[in-house]
Image (tube, rainbow, N blue to C red):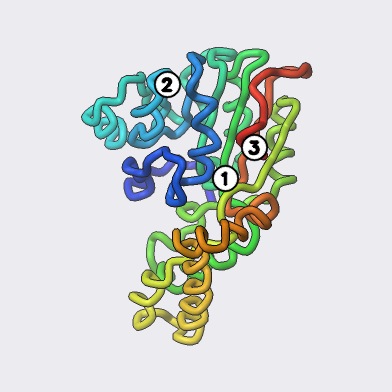
């Protein structure tokens, strides 16, 4: 891991839709309601402007010039600044809300990143951060790294990022001076990619590990299918998401009093 900012041009999927369907990202659905009111919002690491294409009140910060160019070609209306998330080109207390999705887990000095998230937020404003959660999905996902990406550039821990615990993320927010902090698990307990494993069994360093990974990923994949989730009434998510969901979403405010944004999307 490092604090050097890296351009991962394969990491952003612009075409994921923000819609209330089984295939949608759970933190997209949780975050979207916070963007609908006319607040001054900053997305840190905005990529190709996926959120910005839907919510024009979002300002973006992005390190990759290629992503910025793609966003502009796709007609993103909000302004995108090219910059480093460790030293953002904004004055303190500029935005009503700052947020990032899947950013801080890729770097060593997470505290500095969270401090910057908080610095640019006005008193009374919000800071929201999502990261991948440590837990069952982290183990299953780690098998992809060992079977598919061993001895490749993508095996780099910075590429995959560090799975995080609730307490760790809470402490980062608290140390940044944020208050009323809530951290929730959200999303599927497990996600599986058996086809990716199957395609790489032959070139895997360990055939036994690859077969084991294929078995676990197959089980995990079945639980993610629309048919399984509908037949079971989404039971696995309803029972285990709050404790074992694959993502963490943290929210904190820049003052000690109560505020009116609410947590209804996280309950």
* Element class at badge 1: strand
- Label disc, if present, on residue 250 of the rendered structure: 3
In this rendered view, identify the residue nearer to me: 162 or 230: 230
Numbered label tally:
3
Where's residue 180, x and y in %? Answer: 75, 27
Nearer to us in this view, 191 or 33: 33
Asked if one can make out residue 33 in the rendered structure from this viewpoint, the answer is yes
Neighbour tally class for label 2: few under 14, some 14-19, many 20 plus, Cα within 10 Å = many
Q: Position of 101 compared to 175: left or right? A: left
Mark 2 to mark 1 CA distance (whole Å) = 21 Å
- Of the numbered discs in the image, which one, if any, rests on residue 59? 2
Q: Are marks 3 and 1 in contact (CB under 8 Å)?
A: yes
- Residue 73 in percent (x, y) is at 21, 29
Q: Earlier in the sequence, mark 3 or mark 1?
A: 1
Marks 3 and 1 sit apart, C-alpha to C-alpha, by 9 Å
From this view, report whether residue 184 is shown above or below residue 57. below
- What whole-number distance in Å separates the C-alpha atoms at marks 2 and 3? 20 Å
Residue beneath the point at 41% across and 38% down: 18
């Amino acid at each position: 891991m490092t604090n050097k900012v890296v351009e991962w041009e394969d990491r952003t999927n612009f075409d994921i839709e923000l819609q209330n369907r089984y295939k949608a990202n759970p933190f997209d659905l949780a975050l979207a309601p916070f963007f609908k009111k006319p607040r001054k919002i900053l997305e840190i690491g905005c990529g190709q402007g996926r959120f910005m294409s839907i919510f024009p009140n979002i300002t973006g910060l992005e390190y990759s010039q290629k992503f910025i160019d793609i966003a502009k070609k796709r007609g993103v209306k909000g302004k995108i600044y090219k910059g480093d998330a460790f030293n953002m080109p904004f004055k303190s207390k500029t935005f009503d809300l700052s947020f990032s999705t899947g950013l801080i887990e890729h770097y060593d000095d997470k505290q500095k990143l969270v401090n910057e998230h908080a610095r640019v937020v006005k008193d009374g404003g919000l800071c929201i951060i999502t990261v991948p959660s440590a837990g069952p999905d982290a183990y299953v996902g780690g098998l992809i790294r060992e079977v598919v990406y061993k001895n490749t550039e993508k095996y780099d821990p910075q590429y995959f990022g560090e799975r995080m615990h609730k307490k760790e993320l809470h402490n980062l927010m608290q140390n940044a001076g944020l208050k009323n902090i809530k951290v929730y698990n959200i999303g599927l307990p497990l996600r599986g990619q058996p086809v990716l494993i199957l395609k790489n069994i032959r070139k895997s360093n360990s055939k036994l590990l690859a077969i084991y990974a294929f078995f676990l990923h197959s089980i995990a994949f079945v639980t993610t299918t629309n048919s399984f989730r509908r037949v079971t009434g989404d039971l696995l998510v309803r029972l285990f998401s709050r404790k074992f969901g694959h993502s963490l979403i943290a929210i904190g405010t820049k003052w000690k009093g109560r505020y009116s944004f609410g947590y209804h999307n996280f309950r």
